[in-house]
Amino acid sequence: MKLRLSLEALQIVDAIARRGSFSAAGKELFKVPSTISYTVSKLEDDLGVQLFERFGPKVALTAAGEELLKEGRYLLKAAGDLECRVRRVADGWETEFAIGMDSMLSPIGLSKDIEAFYTAADRTRLRIVQEALSGTWEALLDRHVDLLIGAAGEGPSGGGYTAEPIGTISFVFTVSPAHPLAKATSPLSKADLHDYRAVSVSDSARQLEARTVGLLFGQDTLSVPDMLTKFEFQVAGLGFGFLPEDCARPAIANGLLIEKKVREPKPDETFYLAWRPGEEGAALTWWIDRVRSAQPFAKLRKPTWVQ
């Protein structure tokens, strides 16, 4: 099928509509008026519609012309963006760059870094992906993301990635004031916990071995998709568990949760910056340097839902 519509013709129609005449459009596009007139006449003949009403030297779009230009401007913008992206690729910039992080973290903490990135690479599309536990590592190894900023725990064996620790998060064991364990006076043992429901964030990994954190064999468990849901269910008294200290402390101070001592506390979790070696495009290099210098992990630790 031969297309009767070209980007050049759309560009001419757009210029005429904005400038109000063929001659003014010609001056903007550095084309003689006869070329402008011929292109429009041929386009009208090819499409079988009238695009402009003529009023002497002035012209105005018809209803058909309005419809053509409304959609045509999207095509012109897309073509312009494509040209810029192709030039960026030639300069070493990726057309799209995906950042993965654990669902425990708050992506809004990267807002200043993202703003700086768009200044440096305004035509590289950015995508943020959140997974849980081993799911973040799987996303990197399966090429669903290009960089991990805040992957929980060490990566899987077998390699295929480069990783650097960027920070740690401490945890506290909490229950609702209405929970039966709230009345306990001594540090809680595994035997004390076994008969009650734990709230746990589900590992989002599909191929890698899923991680289970702090769960006892045979224990009733309420599995949830992310840390916010876990927090809300623990506040509601539907179970117990460890929460990041940054989000638990305000709730403890407000009486929504009670911190309890346990005989086996959860160790601090280390979070990593990780990427696949040998794929150092300009965007990946920019983000690695940014994380190393700006150290945004502290801003990622406090969820926006914590007041």
Image (tube, helix red, strand yellow):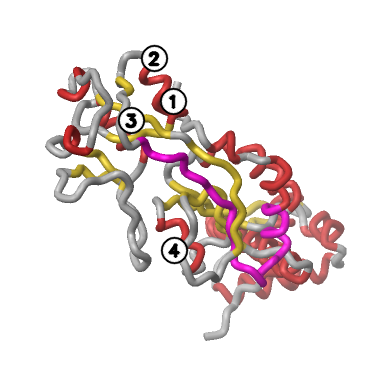
Between circles 3 and 4, the one closer to the viewer is 3
Report which residue position mark 3 lands on.
Answer: 173
Q: CA distance from mark 3 to mark 1?
A: 17 Å
Q: Which range of residues does the magenta coloring cover?
A: 265-288
Label 3 or label 1, whichever comes before in sequence order: 3
Q: CA distance from mark 2 to mark 1?
A: 12 Å
Between circles 2 and 1, the one closer to the viewer is 2
Between circles 2 and 3, the one closer to the viewer is 3
Q: Position of residue 80 (x, y in %)?
A: 70, 62
Q: Secondary structure at mark 3?
A: strand
Examine the structure image and report whether residue 217 is included in the region drawn in magenta.
no
- Residue 228 image-quadrant placement: top left
Q: Secondary structure at mark 2?
A: helix
- Between residue 55 and residue 38, name the one nearer to us: 38
**In this rendering, does residue 55 appear at all?**
no
Q: Are marks 3 and 1 in contact (CB under 8 Å)?
A: no
Label 3 or label 4, whichever comes before in sequence order: 4
Q: Label 3: how many residues lie within 10 Å, few (<14), some (14-19) or many (20+)?
A: many
Q: Position of residue 91 (x, y in %)?
A: 78, 67
**In this rendering, does residue 296 appear at all?**
yes
Report which residue position mark 1 lands on.
Answer: 306
Q: Are marks 2 and 4 in contact (CB under 8 Å)?
A: no
What residue is at 49 percent from the left and 67 percent from the top?
141
Q: CA distance from mark 2 to mark 3?
A: 14 Å
Q: Which mark is residue 178?
A: none
Report which residue position mark 2 lands on.
Answer: 253
Q: CA distance from mark 2 to mark 4?
A: 37 Å
